Image (spheres, coloured by chain):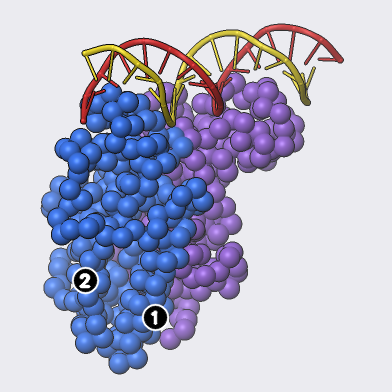
Chain colours: A purple, B blue, C yellow, D red
Amino acid sequence: MQGEIATAGASPEGGAQRPRDKHYSTILQAAQEEFADHGFKGARMQAIADRAGLPKANVHYYFRNKNSLYLAVLDNILNSWNDFFNDVSVKDDPAVTLDTFIRQKVRMSFEDPTASRLFANEIIQGAPYLSGYLQDVMKPWVAERAEIIQSWIDAGKMPDTDPVLLIFMIWATTQHYADFQAQVQSIVAKPEYDEPQMNHIADFVSTTILRGCGLQPPSPISE
Amino acid sequence: MQGEIATAGASPEGGAQRPRDKHYSTILQAAQEEFADHGFKGARMQAIADRAGLPKANVHYYFRNKNSLYLAVLDNILNSWNDFFNDVSVKDDPAVTLDTFIRQKVRMSFEDPTASRLFANEIIQGAPYLSGYLQDVMKPWVAERAEIIQSWIDAGKMPDTDPVLLIFMIWATTQHYADFQAQVQSIVAKPEYDEPQMNHIADFVSTTILRGCGLQPPSPISE
DNA sequence: GTCTATAAGCTGATAGAC
DNA sequence: GTCTATCAGCTTATAGAC
């Protein structure tokens, strides 16, 4: 669609993207929240400026227009999402690996829910800016992890299952707590997420999914 | 927030809401798609009119304004979502009941994904129009189902688990295929959902979740 | 680099002819 | 009931002073 992310090259040097000034990252964060709350079309540049505590024209000084700001936010999020479940090999233990992956994902949902919500908004709305990313980055990523899971199955380390659907299930159950935070909190009647709640959820999700694919959870809990 | 759904009384008579004309439901459907794609703020009355194949003023003839149209769409969706997992009692078999519930939810995701996406948009964006519904309808609904699951646990029909988190897991995994359809289809490389795919997914989700809470799936598949 | 003022275009809503 | 024409207000983006 109108200017997709170009497989998003990682940041030039090691550190964070070295914002030209502190304002750059402030605006990026403000934009992430606004886009997460209202989607691309619903987001307002004025609202982003307000969240950042800056006049609107200042936002336009750092980012050419709404479109490029949105792409910058997406790029920022996707880069921060690498390094999860990445360095996995056939030799690893399925239960330990999946447990670690699930707990990392739950922690991400709790620590940066707006990033997850922004991504969810983009996908729900048909991924107009990310269809290239899904094809070029995410699809191969899934294929590689699915291959590893399949190799575990072939090696008799775990019972037969659909590796791709297993990855979808982990995504769905973990991201749910970021994306549907309003619903979850309304039902469990807690104003905010806290650490014990996160651990309880991580225990439940990991235990249930691992047992669900016939694996023994590495650290048995609550039973 | 600005005019919530008032616990949404069901339609007066038995049948569908008896639209004043065919246009009424046409607009409702068009609005559902537009709101699902862009959220409340991002949706455009002109786009809804275009989708319905009507001039914009005609839309305003049937619905006072954007707000009331959005509420009508939400009301319509929520009413159609009743009667699922509703008539369940302590005497029922957990495996059969959960399996049926999961398969119904998967089918809904495949048959009316825009309804699910619209709801997802609303929740992701903080449930500004549905916070009352979550509190007044959904929270008690979950509490009642959780009680039944807990009674199964107490009766020794299934191992101990967190009933509320189990419901969340079923929601998350089934709705995922509607809400993240763009991502799923991009990764499995199919242009559209079809019946065999739906059955494969329903089998996987049901089998994995049931086994995950220590239940024997009622109709063993693929293993 | 920062910010006020404003241009140019879009959007929700309505008036009023048919 | 239907639809063209149009208004008032909002939204993105920029010009230009500091």
Q: Quadrant of the C terminus of chain B?
A: bottom left
Question: In percent of the image, x 17 and y 52: which residue is there?
Answer: B16
Callout 2: residue from which chain? Answer: B
Tag 2 residue: B99
Callout 1: residue from which chain? Answer: B
Q: Do tags 2 and 1 sit on the same chain? A: yes
Quadrant assignment, res A27:
top right
Does B88 sit above or below residue A64?
Answer: below
Question: In percent of the image, x 57 and y 23: which residue is there?
Answer: A65
State the count of labels: 2
Q: Position of residue B145 (x, y in %)?
A: 33, 76
Q: Earlier in the sequence, mark 2 or mark 1?
A: 2
Q: Position of residue B85 (x, y in %)?
A: 25, 70
Quadrant assignment, res A139:
top left
Which residue is at the far bottom? Answer: B155
Foreground of the two, B117 or A22: B117
Circle 2: residue type: Asp
